[in-house]
Amino acid sequence: MTEAITLVVNGVHHELEVEPRRMLVQVIREDLDLTGTHIGCDTSQCGACTVLVDGQAVKSCTMLAVQADGSSITTIEGMANDGQLHPLQVGFWEKHGLQCGFCTPGMIMAAADLLARNPDPTDQEIRHAIEGNVCRCTGYQNIVAAIREAASLMAAGGTSAGAAG
Amino acid sequence: MATTDVLGARIKRREDPRFITGGGNYLDDIKLPGMTHAVVLRSPYAHARIRSIDTSAARTMPGVLAVYAGQDLAGVNALPCAWAAGGVQNNLNTPRVLAIDTVRWTGDGVAMVVAETREQAVDAAEAISVDYEPLPAVVDAEKATAPGAPQLHENAPNNVCMHWTVGDAEGTARAIESAEIVVRQRIVNQRLIPNPMETRGAIGRWDPGTDEYTIWMTSQAPHVMRLLIAAFVLGVPEHKIRCISPDVGGGFGSKIFLYADMVLTAWASKQLGGRPVKFVETRRENYLATTHGRDHITDLEVAGTKDGTITALRVRTKANLGAYLSTIAPGIPTTLYGRLLSGVYAIPNIYCEVDGIYTNTAMVDAYRGAGRPEATYVVERAVDLFAREAGLDPAEVRRRNFIPPDAFPYQPAVLIGQAGYGLPYDSGNYRPALERALEMAGYTNLAAAKAEARARGKYLGAGISSYIEICGVAPSKWIGLPGEGWGAGLWESANIRMHLTGKVVVTTGSQNHGQGHETTMAQIVAAELGVPFEDVLVEHSDTQGTPFGYGTYGSRSAAVGGVAAQKAALKIKEKARRLAAHMLEASPDDVVFEAGRFYVKGSPDKVKTVQEVALAASVGYDLPEGMEPFLDETAYYDPPNCTFPFGTHVAIVEVDEETGAVDLVRYVGVDDVGRKINPMIVDGQLHGGIVQGVGQALWEGAVYGDDGQLLSGSMLDYALPRASWLPTFELDETVTPSPVNPLGVKGAGEAGTIGSAAAVVNAVVDALSPFGIRHLDMPLSAPKVWRAIHASEVQS
């Protein structure tokens, strides 16, 4: 048994047939082949699967795909624009906000939600906003710096990535 | 950037663009034509006999391709233990890929379903009926050795796997008996669950046309996995197996080892005629069935004089190894633990005995630091306990007992190995790191800070940890079979090819799972060859196309793998010099190399760049007599010694008397990791390491019920550190290059974890000293601290 749903993912319209028991993250990863969104746990604790649903950060392992019917979704693959990295992507790269990279997409999406609500957060506000996202590599310090960097880039209106080295 | 500046530069990481855009390629992202999905049915009992398994219903479920039970894999050998340290010989017990008659821990695999989709496999696994006869279980290493305890293995009476000793038993006993001060304390280093953010998994594919296997795996050591699967488990020739680690989402030790699913997926693919079989753990399975870390019960005795000189340390440890031995489990609480018990101190008498114990729990093996955090925790708690008993400042006791800077290389007796010779601490100067950390932490104003906190209703404490680490674990002749019992070598390798266009491809046997090797190895090679960093590509983690390497763990990839890359570059340079001399019509002895250019001594205007030489080597039509075309060199590096980074960490905590909650308010670290290849990456390693130690000190702990059920079985129940629980770390450095290797590097991957748990616990105990509390076991959760405060007889 499947249900017909409509999703707009990263600006692309999709008509999908999904089993009602399947989670949004499975549809994103398996049906749409957008594997940048990761699954890190089975209890909605780690946040690796965070995406934006109608602009709000959502743990996509906790939302049934049928619940997302009709909504607009942004995943990590939709953050860069015409090859131009999003300021959060620039911030994470510049400030060494990632190591193994597995939590990074979810972390960036959670941070995008924060910066949309609060464009100039304090370190404590950043730490609070990413409480639902676990990183085991970085100790969070450089993630906080990365998000702060993104906030200042966005305030300055700059999004350039710069080259390595 | 000038090529000469590339080594030591804060270069942004090569690997990041793919990770920040969702372009990483982790195991579960791999899709192969005809892919099937495997689910393992796991024992709900910690100890039980399997009377029967009925898979008939499962076999008829939609999409099911096959259901296998242990008996179906009777021809597949048990997984090997590759490090039979500690005298483990006759009672070595390792797991089968699926249990046959008996399950020995909750999570032991009993059957595997392969289906067209993962959901179908899950449904079918639920339809398998297993008739278990439950047996009594034991989960605690001490209870497991008590009379009447449930027995796990016939060949291991009283569940004792091994008994290992190091040091001078008699001398230490005499020193303790005659000492002015002796402090005794039991300390528990609790069991931890490593928790890389990506769980483990494997995809096996057998090719019917070539009879070759390809196994994708979330492994820190794909070359070793291939070797173990070929030589010990499947009996397939090594050259018929290719192992690939794609992007790996963290490991922290737990992905070093050989796991059943790597074998199961490959074996099942052959049964299914070559369809690929994918297995990916759920997080719950990761908690149940992937290795855990630590789990020591230790009785320590520290002795010394009233003026603060430590004269003896005696340590008796029961190390819980779980139901079976994981791949390198015996080496962790022996070689990597007991041999580090001198810490940064000149302690004249040390004796340590370790019993390795089987229990009905998940296997325990290396977890970040692997033995060295346990050793540092013992030593640094012992120093604080001793200082308190002597009525001295813990900082002063450390100063008084540090190995002095003129004593290097320094040979602690406990580091003299089974092979009969020792690995001396390579270099060190411990006091400057301590003094700098104390200065940064405002240690001299501690009394005022405590009074200020008291006025706010808080108890403030400061804790010091002066740690040492063994990094770059090797040399093969020290750690190998006749020495520490490691069943192989521990060298590393690298190959460098310099192409016609001057672009450079480095292949390394090391494995990158977050450490940034694609960046740092390129920095090493670019600096050595004098080529632009952008022109160097680093490839790794595929046994096809990379030279053999033992993998990435033990903070060894810079000090062993990085040096192998440098050695390969030196070989390239040497051949290029001979060719450049030919091109310059000079003697090779007269040709010098500088920043990517060869020229004849005294004639710096007439040059051949290394790229021009690579072109000449590649086209090959004008080479010196006897020279082979192309610049292609492989180097193997087996270092003469390990490296020994060190540092001092200081934690400042505040304890709320009302709730028992501990707030880590400041954390200062001064680390000496030798020369740094990329300081940005080193800082990141330190941050992450510190948090794993802080997590152990304050929040984390694997908890089994007495019946063997894992009570901390999900991220809801196991408290992983969160961003808002942590302060901003304040780091500084001293730099004492290692004389062991030409790069002068030591290693940084585990330093933070090794130093931090003791610093935090020492701080909390200091904060609680007004209550007469001398010791508390980790994790120092609010209820535990609250109870301790309220149980104390001393009312502050």
Image (spheres, coloured by chain):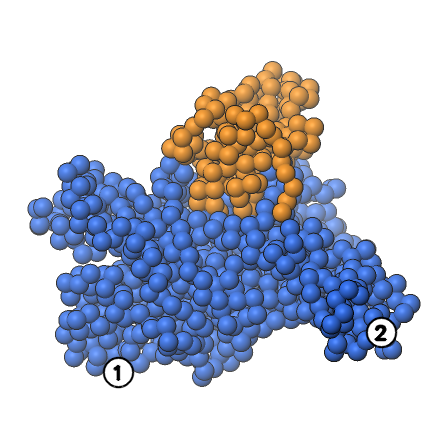
Identify the colour of chain B in the image.
blue
Tell me, by letter, which chain the rendering colours orange: A
Amino acid bearing label 2: Glu
B530 vs B416, nearest the viewer: B530
Q: Residue at x 23, y 61 (%)?
A: B394
A81 vs B89, nearest the viewer: A81
- Where is residue B421 shown, x and y percent of the image? 45, 82
Is residue B540 in view from this perspective? no
Chain letter for the residue marked with disc 2 in the picture: B
Q: Residue at x 8, y 46 (%)?
A: B795
Furthest residue in direction top, as rendered: A70
SS of the residue at dot 2? loop
Q: Mark 1 — residue?
A: B170
Crowding at dot 2, Cα within 10 Å, few <14 / some 14-19 / many 20+, comes out as few
Furthest residue in direction right, as rendered: B621
Q: Residue at x 38, y 56 (%)?
A: B670
SS of the residue at dot 1? helix
